[in-house]
Amino acid sequence: MNRDNPLVLGIETSCDETGIGIVRGSRLLSNTIASSMDEHARYGGVVPEVAARAHLEELVPMIRAATEDAGIRLEDVDAIAVTYGPGLSGALMVGVGAAKALAIALGKPIYAVNHLVGHVGADVLQTDADPGTEPLEYPTIALLVSGGHTSLLLVRDLVSDVELLGETIDDAAGEAFDKVARILGLPYPGGPQIDRVALGGDPAYIRFPRGLSHHKDMEHHRYDFSFSGLKTSVARWVEQTRDAGETVPLADVAASFREAVIDILLTKAVAACTDLGVPRLLLGGGVIANARLRELAVERTDAAGIALRIPPLSLCTDNGAMIAALGAQLIMAGHEPSTLDFGADSTLPASVIQG
Amino acid sequence: MLLAIDTSAGTSVAVVDGVRGVLADIDTADTMRHAEVIGRLIAECLDRANVRVADLTGVVGGMGPGPFTGLRVGIAAARVFALGAGLPFLPVISHDAIALSRFRAGHTGGLVVVTDARRREVNWSAYSGADAAGLPVRLAAPGVAKPAVLLEPDWVYAGLVRADAVTVPAADLGRVAELLLANDRAFATDAAFYLRSPDVTLSNGPKRVS
Ligand SMILES: [Zn+2]
């Protein structure tokens, strides 16, 4: 196997994106994605069975498209990398089964990798649009926010030392956006809709609660998140306003809700940097597409003297390139391949980088 | 020479050859570990058959019916193996393999193949017998039903001999494919036999919290 500059194909099926990525070392060659998001829209959230069915149909076309896009042949690949957790179990299993079969068919090694660590791995990729980024420095704090996860990691080394500092104890932040969008009568996915409606709204109009931020929570849940109370609080506010026969000021509610989510995310992320003396923060996950989050992240990290890194948005949302990237980093660091016996682990801890 | 993969019940993998017969055949009835075992079973099967990927001429996939989560693992593996190896993917209805094995064992006449569909339901397929080529002749598309329905005297296929199975023999899945190829017959549609819609309920908007 080429360990200096390996050509790796990554397979990602942990949620509703069927992602195939191809990298050569740290260089991105293809990031091919099919999303079943539209199929979930009528249900207001990701339906695991619908997602898994879509993965099964999209895998072969996406692998074909990715190799074409990268200008490589499948047999040129040095290794296969695949997400084996955390995520939706039935969805993960489709990717795991496919990846193992592909590795055997090609006679190539397989690397089973952690989805969350993959989000961090996205940052090492060099693209044509962004060829000159400085390499990721360690240690770094990573804040990973999507519809499926909300996690705060301490990454001492991408391929060997990742620690989970905290995560959501109920809904993921992206889920909270979806649920509040429904409360406000907006379609799925909620993030972009809330953003659209919040335009011109007053983020300080209503002071919605910041979950797990009270003094008593800080002992056991210092870096954990909670969004279900926030969601209920928005619902109650909207109901009471309607009950009183008043019009709900959509822009202000949306802006205030969004501010509450973003505030608590960044407050805890910056606190982790400060507490642990780590002057670097990396963002990942689909919710990073939120412009207000990025804007406030710049503001807060600047004020605290923290270097902020945000990979290109196409690499922030779930994708196969980040999985391929992590696989390539493992190979270049001399890690041995996974054996064929791993399964899908829907609750895989962030500290387990490779299976 | 064909690699056959089925995860519609347990996990089974076989390598079959039109001339030399079954070269290797491995299965497990475990219905909970499809993703864990699929790779090892494929690798071991090729090993035992002493066959290289380059020797294969096609990959057969059991398309169900069967419980969804497991079923998909084998279909994904078979389709992607075919893609990786540059081979045709040959979809076969899993119940046809069970029927073929009964006909090969000497059964003649009608047959109803029954497998577990989870959630207190079964999948069934009815056959009138084997044709001149030896292929099972299907009377209707696979169905899903409460077990009691199949026991009712006026059920449309009530008179046929019943064959309950907990595994799908991949060797017979491969044999069905060999017979289809040899007799220039059409393969099944390349689509998983789910037989149920994804069970999701459309909500009527958010519930009140106060
Ligand atoms: Zn993710």
Image (cartoon, coloured by chain):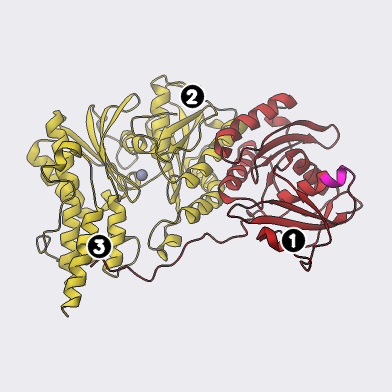
Chain colours: A yellow, B red
Tell me if residue A36 can be seen.
yes
Mark nearest the camera among 3 and 1 is 1
Q: Residue A318 appears at what percent x and percent y?
A: 38, 46
Q: Residue A254 appears at what percent x and percent y?
A: 20, 63
Extreme residue in the right direction = B132
Q: Amino acid at mark 3?
A: Ile
Extreme residue in the bottom direction = A245
Give the label on residue B151, or none. Answer: 1
Q: Chain of mark 1?
A: B
Q: Chain of mark 3?
A: A
Q: Residue A193 appears at what percent x and percent y?
A: 28, 63
Give the label on residue A337, or none. Answer: 2
| Distance Cα–Cα, label 2 vs label 3 | 43 Å
Mark nearest the camera among 1 and 2 is 1
Indicate yes or no whether the magenta region holds residue B121.
no
| Distance Cα–Cα, label 3 vs label 1 | 54 Å
Q: Is residue A287 left or right of residue B165?
A: left
Q: Residue B95 appears at what percent x and percent y?
A: 74, 50
Answer above or below: position of B42 versus B74.
above
**Residue sitting at 9 percent across and 35 percent down?**
A305
**Residue sitting at 21 percent across and 71 percent down?**
A239
The quarter of the picture where the C terminus of chain A appears is top left
Q: Secondary structure at mark 2?
A: loop
- Specify the quarter for ligand 1: top left
- Residue topped by disc 3: A194
Q: Amino acid at mark 2?
A: Pro
Magenta span: B102-106
When asked about the image quadrant of residue A207, the answer is bottom left
Q: Is mark 2 within 8 Å of ligand 1?
A: no
